[in-house]
């Protein structure tokens, strides 16, 4: 019966391949950056996020599933009417498209087996998987001993305020759930999150310093406007290949730096354009003629992506090395404002580290303007539910990968009983048509590998059947009768 079920799953997935892919592209076509600054009644993260939520709920509802909009923060769709629930979590918001795209971020296309578009991988692919999991179970009249509840939020990329607000307002959560927003197999530990906004004195000759759009992405470009003679500055920067200087014609110079963008949690392979700009300009321009002292503090404190300049460098056996990202830079009369994203190991003494950093800021005339700390996530690798997920992963892939820890932060940090599991498969498949630095979840030309995505669907379906199926009455899909009404 096991082989028969898996064969039927394979056949169903193959027959729905094109439909699933087109569904994903419809999701990607809708911009959905979370913008709390554009909040409206019923749209706490701006009109685009609300439109995306409405679209997703409409799609689930169109197949007969009961749906609910929880104040524009979170949406739900149900299969089954049992009181106990098994959850499946995804987020509909995306990071801003950012610079450097070869393809159009919201006009998705398929190339060499990949879907290209902002949000294709992170995380709209998971929302579409949730829809088709529910369709499969409904069409095959699968009887579950728990209701299956798909939940999607609208502000994961901007601090997970969506599920925080939902819980603060008394919202009910499933007893156990899968967060489909990382890689396979089970992510048993996630580093804590330390997000801070600081203001650094800039120096009299710095008029503007800007880079980035969100703190959890490494900026691939940065801009600095300073007072000075254009010819002199251009000559002093001549040996720096990633810097270009442009005469503004009013005694000021605009300097542009190129780096390599990417996800803040995975600094290997990235090159922060803002900290590089600070480091190289401060190194090149003589300090007796240019008042740009703020650049020195930025370079010394944030250039290293593992927190060495902050006094934060640490690691542990469970979750690995701390990562540090200065993601957004803006300037006003008070100084250079920097938005930081730190992912710290499970065992790090974060309170003591915070106090030490406050002292460092004070000694340099800088100010800590805001701070939020998310606790790390951890679940025992021997938990029975973890073992079920691991077994399903191994059966579908034939791989023996062990549970892993990561720096990426998912809803597991803020949703009790939620374990991160897929949908990314570490299979080494890369888009050969894209240059280095392109294709990643938070970088330009974000891609989703279609074959890996469809394989993830099978892993999830098998996992749900194992976690929630009534084994006493279960038979082949044709033998089951659905006990509830999914409306």
Image: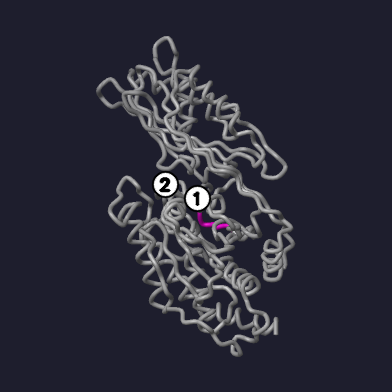
In the picture as drawn, the residue positioned furthest to the left comes out as: 250
Image position of 69 (left or right of 388): left
Q: Residues within 10 Å of mark 2 (few under 14, many from 20)?
A: some
Q: Position of residue 148 (x, y in %)?
A: 53, 71
Rendering quarter of residue 350: top right
| Rendered view: 196 above or below 142 | above
- Towards the viewer: 311 or 219: 311
What secondary structure is marked by label 1? Answer: loop
Which residue is the site of mark 1? 438
- Towards the viewer: 333 or 189: 189
Magenta stretch holds residue 432: yes
Q: Position of residue 426 (x, y in %)?
A: 64, 58
What secondary structure is marked by label 2? Answer: loop
User: In the rendered structure, are the residues bearing label 2 and label 1 in contact, judged by CB atoms less than 8 Å apart?
Assistant: yes
Inter-mark Cα distance, 2 to 1: 9 Å
First to last magenta residue range: 430-435
| Rendered view: 203 above or below 354 | above
Which residue is the site of mark 2? 100
Magenta stretch, main secondary structure class: loop
């Amino acid at each position: 019966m096991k082989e028969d079920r898996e064969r039927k799953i394979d056949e169903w997935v193959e027959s729905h391949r094109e439909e699933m892919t087109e569904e994903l592209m419809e999701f990607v076509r809708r911009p959905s950056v979370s913008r709390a600054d554009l909040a409206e009644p019923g749209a706490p993260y701006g009109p685009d996020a609300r439109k995306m939520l409405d679209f997703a709920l409409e799609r689930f509802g169109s197949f007969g599933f009961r749906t609910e909009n929880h104040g524009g923060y979170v949406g739900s769709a149900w299969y089954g009417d049992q009181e106990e629930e098994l959850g499946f979590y995804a987020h509909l918001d995306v990071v801003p498209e950012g610079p450097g795209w070869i393809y159009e971020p919201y006009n998705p296309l398929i190339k060499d087996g990949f879907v290209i578009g902002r949000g294709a991988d992170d995380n709209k692919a998971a929302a579409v998987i949730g829809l088709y999991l529910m369709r499969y179970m409904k069409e095959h009249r699968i009887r579950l001993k728990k209701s299956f509840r798909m939940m999607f939020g609208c502000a994961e990329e901007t601090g997970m305020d969506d599920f925080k607000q939902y819980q603060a307002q008394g919202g009910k959560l499933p007893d156990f759930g899968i967060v489909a927003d990382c890689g396979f197999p089970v992510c048993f530990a996630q580093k804590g999150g330390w997000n801070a906004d600081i203001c650094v004195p800039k120096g009299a000759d710095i008029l503007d310093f800007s880079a980035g759009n969100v703190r959890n992405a490494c900026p691939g470009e940065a801009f600095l406007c300073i007072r000075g003679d254009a010819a002199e500055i251009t000559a002093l920067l001549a040996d720096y290949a990633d810097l270009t200087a442009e005469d503004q014609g009013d005694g000021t110079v605009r300097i542009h730096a190129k780096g390599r963008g990417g996800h803040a949690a995975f600094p290997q392979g990235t090159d922060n354009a803002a900290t590089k700009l600070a480091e190289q300009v401060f190194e090149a321009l003589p300090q007796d003629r240019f008042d740009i002292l703020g650049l020195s503090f930025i370079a010394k404190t944030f250039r290293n992506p593992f927190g060495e300049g902050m006094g934060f460098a640490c690691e542990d056996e469970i979750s690995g090395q701390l990562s540090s990202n200065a993601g957004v830079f803006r300037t006003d009369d008070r100084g250079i404002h920097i938005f930081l994203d730190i992912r710290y190991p499970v065992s790090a003494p974060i309170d003591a580290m915070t106090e030490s950093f406050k002292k460092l800021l004070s000694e340099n005339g800088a100010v800590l303007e805001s701070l939020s700390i998310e606790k790390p996530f951890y679940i025992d690798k021997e938990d029975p539910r973890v073992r079920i997920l691991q077994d399903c992963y191994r059966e579908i892939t034939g791989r023996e990968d062990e549970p892993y820890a990561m720096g990426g932060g998912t809803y597991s940090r803020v949703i009790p009983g939620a374990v991160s599991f897929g949908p990314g498969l570490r299979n080494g498949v890369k888009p050969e048509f894209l240059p280095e630095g392109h294709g990643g979840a938070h970088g330009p030309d974000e891609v989703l590998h279609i074959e890996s995505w469809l394989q993830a669907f099978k892993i999830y379906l098998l996992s749900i059947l194992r976690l929630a199926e009534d084994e006493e009455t279960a038979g082949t899909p044709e033998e089951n009768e659905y006990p509830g009404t999914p409306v």
